Image: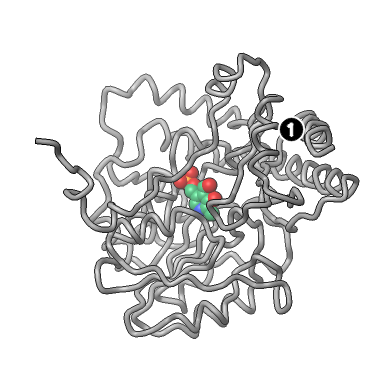
């Protein structure tokens, strides 16, 4: 008898498309028989990890026969000090994706709804759908009242109803790079009904230098339903180790901890994350490199007459002027991996991560050739 495994899966999973990661460099080199490929596709830190984090990771490796410290006591304590909150407000995740998934498992399920924006980070639809909840997707700004492609909080608010349990907001959003300022976001958060949790995903927090960009961990005192997520994958350069966290009220953290896998953040990641928090110099040079790299890409796009979405993250979405799939393939053949974002409803855009100066230059040169 042939098994129809799909029919055995729960309904949410049956219709799910898996998350599409960027193509690994080794895979591209093998596929096209090329060398020296560059990857500007997954919003990683092109400088890599700092030396302090690397040294701590190496040291922790020696003790890897032991289970990690389950709740991540030291890391939670350090993060609590950093955010001026109590350690029991921190929930560690195997990357912040893990925390987003825990939030969905705690607050969502069949019969209730989550609200997020069109073009929002791809893990929200996956997490929502996997637990059988209903997604209510707000149209993004069209450019008339806010940055085109950005979250439209008025449209999002209008989708919040009695069955809404979670609102996901990425600030800044990936792949658009658009962001929400303090006043507008706070008004939205404080105006939500009591039965709605609001998740503010600040994966790119450290990169943002805009004066009006809020650190919403500071709002927890008077926004009880807020959950802020952060990660060590981006500016801290530890994407491969998988460490992220949520800051919330302790009662909410307790709920998240009920579904958290006991040892979800491994000991090497915990040690590296702790050390990374002390490596201010590495963080500062990462942010500086991003700023100059972003300027380099933006002036390159202007020179090529390409429009782009202004971004405050470490990536930028550029309009290739037609279907981007072909441009993506041609870039691949020249050893440059970027990210097509048709699955985000943006078929003409490519998302490119800000790389090292020479990587950005190579990407721009190849892009010019490919579009000629
Ligand atoms: C907006 C946003 N949130 C969360 C994440 C998850 O990152 P991680 O699971 O590595 O912490 C990403 C990664 O690309 C992201 O872009």
- Asked which quadrant contains residue 176, the reply is bottom right
User: In the drawing, does residue 139 fall left or right of residue 15?
Assistant: right
User: In the drawing, does residue 297 fall left or right of residue 234?
Assistant: right
Q: Where 190 falls versus 241 (above or below)?
A: below
- The residue indicated by pointer 1 is 356
Q: Is mark 1 within 8 Å of ligand 1?
A: no
Indicate the secondary structure of the residue bearing disc 1: loop
Q: Where 125 falls versus 303 (above or below)?
A: below
Q: Position of residue 71 (x, y in %)?
A: 30, 46
Camera-side residue: 132 or 228?
A: 132
Residue at 34 percent across and 80 percent down: it is 195
- The quadrant in which the N terminus is found is top left
Residue at 38 percent across and 56 percent down: it is 87
Extreme residue in the right direction: 303
Q: Where 253 falls versus 232 (above or below)?
A: below
What's the colour scheme? one colour
Q: Position of residue 24 (x, y in %)?
A: 54, 28
Extreme residue in the left direction: 1
Residue 44 seen from this side? yes
- The quadrant in which the C terminus is found is top right
Q: Position of residue 174 (x, y in %)?
A: 58, 54
Camera-side residue: 229 or 361?
A: 361
Residue 92 seen from this side? no
Residue at 87 percent across and 50 percent down: it is 305
Q: How many marks?
A: 1
Q: Where 95 falls versus 68 (above or below)?
A: below
Camera-side residue: 351 or 5?
A: 5
- At label 1, counting other C-alpha atoms closer than 10 Å, the crowd grade (few under 14, some 14-19, many 20 or more) is some
Residue at 58 percent across and 51 percent down: it is 342
């Amino acid at each position: 008898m042939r098994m129809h495994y799909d029919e055995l899966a729960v309904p949410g999973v049956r219709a799910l498309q898996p998350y599409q990661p960027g193509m690994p460099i080794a895979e591209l080199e093998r596929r096209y028989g090329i060398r020296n490929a560059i990857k500007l596709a997954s919003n990683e830190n092109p400088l890599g990890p700092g030396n302090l984090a690397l040294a701590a990771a190496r040291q922790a490796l020696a003790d890897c026969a032991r289970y990690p410290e389950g709740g991540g006591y030291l890391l939670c304590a350090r993060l609590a000090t950093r955010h001026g909150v109590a350690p029991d407000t921190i929930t560690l995740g195997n990357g912040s994706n893990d925390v987003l998934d825990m939030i969905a498992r705690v607050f969502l399920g069949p019969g209730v709804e989550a609200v997020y924006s069109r073009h929002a980070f791809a893990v929200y639809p996956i997490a929502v759908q996997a637990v059988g909840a209903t997604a209510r997707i707000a149209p993004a700004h069209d450019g008339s009242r806010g940055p085109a492609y950005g979250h439209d909080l008025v449209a999002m608010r209008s989708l919040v109803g009695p069955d809404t349990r979670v609102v996901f907001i990425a600030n800044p959003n990936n792949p658009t790079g658009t962001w929400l300022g303090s006043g507008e976001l706070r008004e939205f958060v404080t105006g939500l009904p009591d039965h709605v949790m609001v998740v503010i995903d600040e994966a790119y927090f450290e990169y943002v230098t805009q004066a009006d960009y809020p650190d919403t961990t500071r709002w927890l005192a008077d926004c009880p339903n807020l959950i802020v997520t952060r990660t060590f994958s981006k500016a801290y350069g530890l994407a491969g180790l998988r460490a992220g966290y949520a800051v919330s009220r302790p009662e909410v953290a307790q709920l998240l901890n009920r579904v958290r896998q006991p040892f979800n953040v491994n000991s090497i990641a915990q040690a590296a994350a702790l050390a990374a928090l002390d490596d201010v110099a590495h963080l500062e040079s990462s942010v500086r490199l991003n700023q100059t790299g972003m300027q380099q890409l933006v002036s390159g796009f202007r020179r090529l007459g390409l429009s782009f979405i202004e971004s405050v993250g470490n990536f930028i979405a550029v309009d290739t002027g037609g279907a981007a799939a072909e441009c993506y393939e041609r870039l691949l053949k020249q050893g440059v991996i970027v990210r097509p974002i048709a699955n985000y409803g943006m078929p003409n855009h490519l998302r490119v991560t800000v790389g090292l100066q020479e990587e950005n230059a190579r990407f721009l040169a190849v892009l010019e050739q490919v579009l000629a």
